[in-house]
Image (spheres, rainbow, N blue to C red):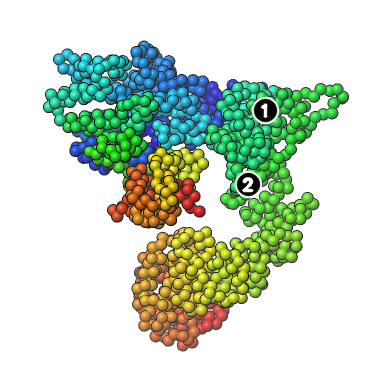
Amino acid sequence: MIDRVLISAFTPGNTDPERLERISVQRASLVRRITERLVRSMTTGDKHHILLVGPRGSGKTHVVTLVMNRLQQRPEVADCMRVAWLGEEQQITGLLDLALEIADRLAEQYPTEFQTEYRSYVKGLADDDDAAIAILNRICEELQHRNLVLVMENLDRTFAAMKDSGQKYWRAFLQEQVRFATLSTAQQLIHGVASRDEAFFGFFEIEHLGPLSVDAAFELLRRISIEQGRMDLVAFLDSPAGRYRVRALHHLAGGNQRMYVLLSEYLTRDSLDDLICSFERLGEILTPFFQERMQKLSAQQARLVQCLSNADAALSVKEICEHTLIAEGSCSKQLGILKQFRYVLSSKRGKETFYELAEPLLRLCLECCSHHGQPLRLIARFLKVWFAPINLQVTMQPAGYHLTKADRYRIASQQLNDEFHVEIRRRLAEEIARQIDGRQPSQAIELIEELRSASPPDALWYEALVSIADHQWDTAVRCTDELLSASETSDRYRTVATFLRGDAFCGKGLPDLARQDYTSLIENSLATTEIRTQALFARANLDLEAGDHARALEDCTRLIQLTVDAPDLQTRARLLRGLISLKMGQTEQSAADFSAILQVGDPETVAEAPVSDPGLDTGYTASANSADPVLPDKNAPLKAFALLGIASALLSVGDHRRALEAYRTILRQRNLPPDIESMAAFAIAEPLLAVADIGLVIQDLRSAFERRLKETEHYGAPGGLVKQILKKGHGEWSQYITAITPLFIEFGAASKLGRALVESIELLDGDIYSHAQLKLWRDVWQAVAAGCPELVMPIRCLNAATDVLLMKSPSDRPLFRLPLEVRTLIYPLLRKSLGKPA
Amino acid sequence: MAGQLSSDHVVGRARVIDRIWRALQKKSLRFTAERRIGKTTIMKKMAAEPRPGWRVMFIDLEAISSAEKFAEDLVTRMRPWMSVEHAGKTLFQRFLETVGGSEIAGVFKLPEFGKLGWKATLEKAFEGIFAHLHAGRSSEMLLFLFDELPYMLQKISFYDERRGSQENSALEILDTLRELQGRFPQLRMVFAGSVGLHHVLHNIRGADFAAESLNDMPLVEIAPLDSDDAIQLASQLLDFDNVRTAGVDRESVVRCLAESTDGVPFYMERVVSQLADLERPVTTEDIRRSVRRHLTDDHDHWEMEHFRSRLRIYYPGEMSDAGRQPVAMRVVASAVLDILATATEPHTVERVWQELRARLPLTERQEIPGLLGLLVKDHYLISDEDKRYSFRFPLIRTWWILAQGLNS
């Protein structure tokens, strides 16, 4: 048998403080924070007033007990702190009553320091509030150099009893005397604290105690089991099946800490009978509490609560109206009030709001009141979660046998549908997906094991997904193979598994097998358009990687036709086709795609735009007008990206002015992703150099550097800048190079400039430049780069390369002055003079 | 800051307090500020650290609901100043002999059937104290910091009205305090409160005479912390709750906290408290998310809805539209706030008027400057040197945009 006093669910103060510390979960930082605030309140002139808000059983008293235990162990407050702890049972009837309670507690706790004759002290003061303040002032005198921590549980009740006048006197006293720090609890946020018009608005540091998370609940049960020496239970809780059951209990208990402490006792009940009796007794004990709460509700509100109590799941307003026959307007209004007073919880999904009872214990009690000897559904559900199906079977009995209570509960459990299991699995699946998205594969796998204990096929799906995300290709192929060979996998799911397997083959470096899977999906009429689209994208990427641009283009064109009804996907397809076309030198085609992207938001235009329309003129003009630089636009990054493509296309056909205009349009937009902004800010230098004077180029470059884009890939990338300088007459080289280089050095981008300089070697190759020009190019660079460590190697490369080009019969001999790894990079740049490297 | 800070822990405010002390050399003052901006903190710091030659008393008047109670409370608090003995009796004993009344448990009570009444009793108390100061040739100044005075006046006025009393005790209190200031050159007072005193006076005295009792008391606006002080406080709050910042960029996290809460300690502290629960190093994004969550929170723990709901109380009355139909003043005020919340630059009166007319068929332009002035007094708006109006606090502006659905 378990010692029931060991861990008290209702009075944490009765539990050994060290044990209480050991079983504490989720609130560690809160307890630490409150303790430090109160220490500070006792040792300095600051005074903190803390209010813990949470429904019944959420752990408020637990936190208070922990804080006070810790506080009393702190040596620095031993002499300067006195405590008056008004417990939950204390019924305060007004400010005078509060003052007297504090006085009595102090006199009881510290008899040598505080007098007991407060009542006679204020005799004759007719006004209760005056008397209260006189007593409180007297307490302050008797505190001497010390401060007081006042613990008040159920502040909501106390505030209600003090009324407006008492609250204001109380606040004025706290404000003026500054000797009391308070630690209070309340079941809901009270008007006197939460309203800006009220005296205590902003006075308290309010801490809302949220429900325990599944992990915290699991940890709590585990720690309690350890405290109780139930190592068998600990082992079970540590298993995936155990974790799954805790998750299921979490669904029933709603994260209520007290519920877990109670459940922890019942988990160790050996017989079903014993457990059922304990549960029913609990319901009976709690019922008066909840009945009192129910009596505060109007008839309509009580009907709503009863309706939610009867429901197996959260209900929408419409469903609640149907059950209760209350008009929708009143229903919503009353639900709002019930939510405000923490009777119900709401969750918004799309346009609908779902409501459920905030406190599962309330459900138990409501059932207790109306079950008339029938099994309580909450208990039946609990049994279904906790016991294996075999334990819930009712053995065949001879005729005339009277069913025991346990039998009736077994039957009730079996009759319950698995709806709430479906819900638990859905939540578990969401959690797994979150872990996959957050790249936490080990956590995801742990959850998958949990899911496997309840539903092996579901687990296999997630295992495949997490393996792909974690690049565990063999496992992914194994899982998808298993799914494809399982007879229960539907045709629809089969296509998904095929797609995943294609991805896994890609990852494994088996493009042919991947292609086969993607192709089978593309040609499969049973596959959804979504899957076929994804398969086409994947196959186009495979083709692109294989260098088969023509086939990739074909897939893109097919994609564009397939995604007429999905503008977002169509845009992606156009983007891909635009990039491929650009790579293939089909600038008109790419500009047409990019121009079409700029019409995003107007799907019809995208659909009607002929793919073959060269559209450079119309497309670009439209782009400049449609990319509004002022209004924030969710498609702005995409448009900017397309404009980048257009600018690239324009540059490749030598239309610098319009390329410049395109870059400027991008840079006028707000909230651009830094990568795109950086790319445009630096790429603009190339067309600018072609059409504007050096002053403007320097000005733009400086402003690009000052855009604080240092973390981006394109920061300081000179792109075609060096190439463009080279294209200028050699008479201007010195002016440009001398002006630009110091800027790159100043902003820490010299290495990027160096790379561009090395790449420019390719443009020197061939008989374009005279020897004098080659020397000039080299000498100018050499002069400006002097003293810049990042440019040492590029200059060495340039020297070696120009030496090659200055030779009557070029040979690679000068390149041997370079390290091997650098030399191999230079060879391809000089292929015209040197031919293919040996 | 929620809770109470000892005066030596108050961050910033040195400059404004200096300014206040300088101003008090000449005249009594009125403080104005939104709730939780830090008026009380400033007053309590002044009371805890009085300048040489000043004796200061801080009094929270929120609980007082009658003129008699006000006088009793004031005398009870002045009691320690009346403990000096002369010819075998304390000042307070002489005072009691003059006015009657009693003292129980340190609380002064007016005599039940006294002839003097609360006003004269109060005058006698001040007379006694100042007579004593003059006798000792003391040039000591007395300063009373009255917190939540407008609220008290409102409440007293409400109870008078409910009792069907012909008296206007609230107004009498104000007049008495003004008379006392006139009689005793060594007396100064500060009136403070989150309820706009202009609204209270408007109600108890009428629109034409609203400001009469206060003309000689300059208004001091208590602003949120300035940028440097807000940054210092943000840093202290993060340290106090052991909130670590992600990466090495602590400075930008601190700055973001200070800026995104408009330098209001109350909001700053709430955000830090939420950040502390994350139990991981925080980023500027966490701060922005927390502020936004507070602003959009269904439970509205920052009570921002107050800025909308109080329009109904603060802006009574109507204007006429082109069809001579009434348009509630609160509707016009709300429309003005809508316009300025979405404006990209401050607006002149004329521009506000033009945009208002695009929304409401109004004809009475002459009402608009007054309305804008009230919105400034109520801390919604601020005007620049060209009399162009914009939102006073970016945070309230953001909330207004979200709450009014102006962001879609």
Please give the chain letter of the residue carrying mark 1: A
Query: How dense is the environment of label 1, judged by Cα within 10 Å: few (below 14), some, or many (20 and up)?
Result: many
Residue at the image point whose x is 27% and y is 29% from the top: B172
User: What numbered label is drawn on residue A367?
Assistant: 1
Determine the residue located farthest toward the bottom in the rendered image: A808
* Image position of A71 (left or right of A537): left
Q: Quadrant of the N terminus of chain B?
A: top left
Upstream in sequence: badge 1 or badge 2: 1
Residue A223 position by quadrant: top right
Foreground: B395 or A252?
B395
Q: Label 2, secondary structure: give it.
A: helix
On the image, the x and y values in percent for residue A506 come to: 66, 62
State whether residue A271 appears in this view: no
Residue B355 position by quadrant: bottom left
* Image position of B379 (left or right of A91): left
Disc number lying in front (1 or 2): 1
Residue at the image point whose x is 38% and y is 79% from the top: A733
User: What numbered label is drawn on residue A83?
Assistant: none
The span from disc 1 to disc 2 (Cα, nearest Å) is 31 Å
User: Is label 1 in contact with label 2 (beta carbons under 8 Å)?
Assistant: no
Q: Amino acid at mark 2?
A: Glu
Foreground: A264 or B45?
B45
State whether residue B357 appears in this view: yes
Residue at the image point whose x is 71% and y is 47% from the top: A458
Query: How dense is the environment of label 2, judged by Cα within 10 Å: few (below 14), some, or many (20 and up)?
Result: few
* Image position of A772 (left or right of A275): left
The answer to whether dots 1 and 2 both sit on one chain is yes
On the image, the x and y values in percent for residue B247 come to: 45, 50
Q: Which residue is mark 2?
A: A430
On the image, the x and y values in percent for residue A28 come to: 50, 35
Position of residue B134 relative to residue B14, above or below, is above
Position of residue A624 relative to residue A830, above or below, is above
